[in-house]
Image (cartoon, grey):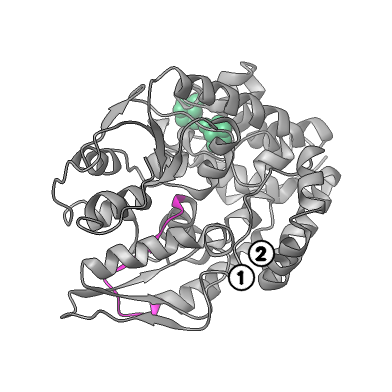
Amino acid sequence: MHSMKSAYSSDINKCVRCGSCKALCPTYAEDPVEMRGARGRLTLLQGLFDGRTSPSKLLNQHINSCILCGACNRSCPLGIDLMEALYHGRSVLKKSNRMGAVLRALTKLSIAWPDMAYKAARMAQKSVLPALARMGVMPAIPELPESPLRAADQVFKTQRKKRGRVAIFTGCSVNYIYPHFGESLIHVLHRLDYEVILPKGETCCGSPLRSLGLEDEAVEQAKRNHGVFSRLKVEAILSLCPTCTMTLKHEYPKMIGKGLDRAMDISTFFIDKLDHTDMIQKKAFFHNPCHLQFGLGVSKEPKEIIKRAGVELVGPEQSACCGFGGLFCMSNKQLSADLLESRGETIASSGADTVITSCPGCIMQLSRTVTDRPVIHLIELIEDAFYFRGEEQKLLF
Ligand code: SF4
Ligand code: SF4
């Protein structure tokens, strides 16, 4: 019998089986079987950590079918950290998860040599990548830009008197797939008279590695990023990806004993800096990314900023998962597609002219099904609505 004593055992053993953590669990909503929900997974992990349950194919399936959205953590009245237990469970189970071996190897390679992976992907984007997407091996990714956002140490100085200094944690998806989001952020910060720094040495936040149970490798990334960003004299560390922000701020303390406290979502940073413009008289659907609402606890600020731009929000108040989940959309294709389908139906029936979200991954996922209206990042709305007055607009709407 496998035996594993874990630091998480005492936390998860406080569970009273109330089931609150299942209420917003997207995988349980899609497949209402106890073991496909938060409480069921927690019960399985208790068995694994206590040595009552051995690793098996089925156990791997249940634990790896979790999208790591964080809804369960927000819902548990006892504050049990289910996410940490899930990460740890995956780390314990990885040796018995042969199916994940290829994904683990590819992820490790791409994170160790990201520029090489990007160049290879650029060469393959007209041939191999579309074929792999058609076969369902990986999601379709948009055309890759000619160059990533980040180069060497980059400081973007202001023309006028400096109001402050801000660092950007670009994250892999913005750096390699959506650099124009980063350019929009730099532009908006400049218009607010902030000096902007993109420091040399940033690496993957570590989240994809953790999701695959590669804890040691994730810790390595956390130490490197902490070393680079904690030295900077900045008032905030902004990322356009809520997963990166959540990892830097809330997961690094659990991984390496110290976090990057100044990491925050752009909506938290901009909320007290943007006036009403009422520039854009449209209806929009706000898709709140899981790691923004559950990981960072942010919901009000992005909605308030959207309203200040003149946009009317339509659709249900409570957001739901789009099914992306980083590598989840590759390891759990059907479940990911089912979640996307129901999200697409909600969006289609909302009557929105456009979809606004705050996560590059959600944009990639939602764009697969929402093809009749724009799907944009909040920073694009901010740039268009608040900082193109009297200038040429991007006409996103
Ligand atoms: S992280 Fe999300 S998908 Fe996973 S168990 Fe918790 S609520 Fe369910
Ligand atoms: S909400 Fe917390 S206490 Fe209730 S079943 Fe889930 S983990 Fe256990």
Hey, which quadrant is residue 78 in on the image?
A: top left
SS for dot 1 = helix
The residue under the point 17% across, 41% down is 278
Locate residue 299, reporting x and y percent.
31, 38
119 left or right, relative to 258: right
Q: Which of the two residues, 280 or 250, is positioned nearer the viewer here?
A: 280
289 left or right, relative to 5: left
- What is the number of callouts on the image? 2
Q: For the residue carrying disc 1, how many other residues have a C-alpha within 10 Å: few (<14), some (14-19), or many (20+)?
A: some
Residue linked to disc 2: 216
CA separation in Å, label 2 and label 1: 6 Å
The label number, if any, that marks residue 28 in the structure image: none
Locate residue 275, reporting x and y percent.
13, 50
Ligand 1 has an atom within 8 Å of the beta carbon of the residue at disc 1: no
Q: Magenta segment: does it hold 241?
A: yes
Q: For the residue carrying disc 2, how many other residues have a C-alpha within 10 Å: few (<14), some (14-19), or many (20+)?
A: some
The residue under the point 23% across, 81% down is 159
The magenta segment? 230-242
Quadrant location, the N terminus? top right
Hey, which quadrant is residue 330 in on the image?
A: top right
Q: Magenta segment: does it hold 323?
A: no
Q: Amino acid at mark 2?
A: Asp
Q: Which of the two residues, 161 or 295, is positioned nearer the viewer here?
A: 161
Q: Which of the two residues, 319 or 157, is positioned nearer the viewer here?
A: 157
SS for dot 2 = helix
Q: Amino acid at mark 1?
A: Glu
Residue linked to disc 1: 220
Mark 2–mark 1 contact, CB under 8 Å? yes
* Up-down relation of residue 112 to residue 243 (above or below): below
The residue under the point 24% across, 34% down is 281
114 left or right, relative to 103: left
